[in-house]
Each structure stands twice: as C-alpha cells, then as structure tokens.
Image (spheres, grey):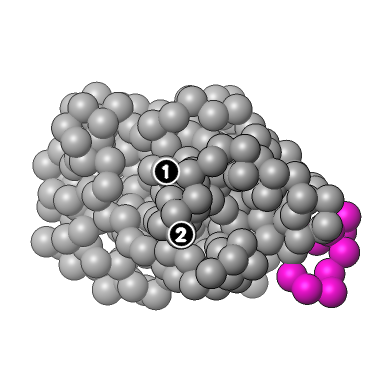
Amino acid sequence: MSIRDFLTTHPVFTVDELEQYQHRIGSESKWTRKSLLAYHRKQGHIIQIRRGLYAAVPAGVEPETFSPDPYLIAGKMSKDAVLSFHTALELQGSAYSIFNEYYYLTRANIQPVEFRGMHFRSVRFPKALSRNGKEGSCVKDIDLYGVSVNVATLERTLVDLFHKPEFGGGWEEIWRSLEMVSYFDFDEVVRYALLLENATTIAKVGYFLQQNSKRLMVKTEHLEPFQKHKPKQPHYMDRKYNGDSHLIKEWNLIVPDYIADRAWEEPG
C-alpha cells in the first residue's frame, strides 16, 4: 500500500490518521511523515486546511481552486466532533437555506477556522450533557465519501436549536427549516430535552410542537412531559429581542409577536 491508497480512502484526514496508517504499514519515522506531507503538498496531491488537517486533491483538479466537502472538514475538526445545529439540518436535507458557516460540537476549545470562503465554528457540548456523560446522546453516523462522520439526529437538532438559537440563522430560518421535517420521534425529543436540564428550552420545544401539532400529528400525551417541566415563572423566548412580545400562559413563555404571528409568511 502507498500514500496514494491512503488518500483514496481519506479525502479529508488528520496527521494522527496518517500516523496510524504509517504504523500499519510498518513506517514509524516522523520524518517520513513530514517528508510525505511536504512532497505531496508540493505535487498538488494534498492541501492543508489548518494545522494537522489536510484534504486529498482529486486527479486533474487544481489544488489552488479545490474546495473539499465542508461537512467532511467539520467532521474532522476534532476527534469528538458532532455536526450540529443548522449544519445538521443541511446535511440531512432539512435546511430552508444553505449557509457557508458550519457548526460542530466538541469538548475541545478550537478557534474558528476560515478556509476558502467556508467558516467552521466549534461549540462546546452543553454542560448538563458533559456533567452526566451524555454528550453522545441522539447522535448518528453518516457516510460521506466512504468516511463516517457524527451528526446530531433531527430530534436532537430540534432541541439544540431552541437551546442555542444563535446557531440556527435566526428564528425565521429555524422555523422554516424545522417545518421541512415531516416526522420527529417524540419520545426521543422528550428524552433529549430533559437531558439539558433547562426549563426554558423545554417550553420552547413544547410551544413549537404545539404550533405544528396538526402537521406533525402531535397528541396531548406528547406535550405532557413538556408541560410538566416548563418554567414556573414566565421566561423570555428571546432575551435579546426588544420588540413587541406577549406571554403564552400555557408555556410561561414570552414570545415575540413576529414569531407567534409567523410574520415572515406572505399574506393570503
């Protein structure tokens, strides 16, 4: 086997993965690894995305203009990366719009990375998940070009977007995107929402499901766990919003009027 074989099966790869490959073929020299990287970069076979992360350049493609798959890049940004928020929607075909910013959850403190017009941003796992060892809840593997990447399920993404809406592209984008999803496993939504230990998030999710009850066939029993764990006092759906809002007593949630009225929809 050669480095070309490695590149064929690793369209985006880390230095650690290359080291593991060299170990399997019996080459332990760090200098050999550095030499290989330097040589193949010079030949235009690979490009560097950031320190320790590279991408293989397909034959016949100019390395100066080649853009690797952004979801593969995000999935390789850290060993524990989980593609999340709006990025998880995009990857699963449920995003209203396509962004050039890609989000992934990780334990690591990684600075934002910009590469050829694409922006990659790390987000730390919610504290409640880390504290209870539940960071991997509602995560699945998706195969991209023969590489497995971790992505949040749609159930987890629904909850995460209401927990940290700043990573969803705005309330209109969140609402329109989630309304593209035709089915949620309500038991999974409840299970994950409770793991976050946040009453406001639970109320937001419950409110959304209630607003979409007919389309999603949400029954009263599906909403009961959310009702049980909603805030005891009114909480703001969006603390940063200063416009007109009103209290939805059923959820103890102060909701911006433009969200409650779905102001982005065309009249008629």
Q: Nearer the viewer, residue 4 or 168?
A: 4
> Would residue 184 be visible to someone looking at this image?
yes
Residue at 30 percent of width and 67 percent of height = 184
Q: Nearer the viewer, mark 1 or mark 2?
A: 2
Instruction: Assess whether residue 127 is covered by the magenta stretch.
Output: no
Name the secondary structure under disc 2: loop
Q: Tell me, yes or no, if residue 250 can be seen here.
A: no
Q: Which label was assigned to residue 79?
A: 1
**Magenta run includes residue 64:** yes
Q: Tell me if mark 1 has few (under 14), some (14-19) or many (20+) residues whose alpha carbon lies within 10 angstroms of its own.
A: few
Kindly report the secondary structure that dominates the magenta region of the rendered protein.
loop
In the image shown, does 204 or 75 lie closer to the viewer?
75
Q: Are dots 1 and 2 in contact, CB under 8 Å?
A: no
Which amino acid lies under the numbered mark 1 shown in the image of this protein? Answer: Lys
- Name the residue: 48% across, 25% down: 109
Query: Disc 2 designates what residue?
Result: 25
Up-down: is 62 above or below 227?
A: below
Q: Which residues are magenta?
A: 58-68
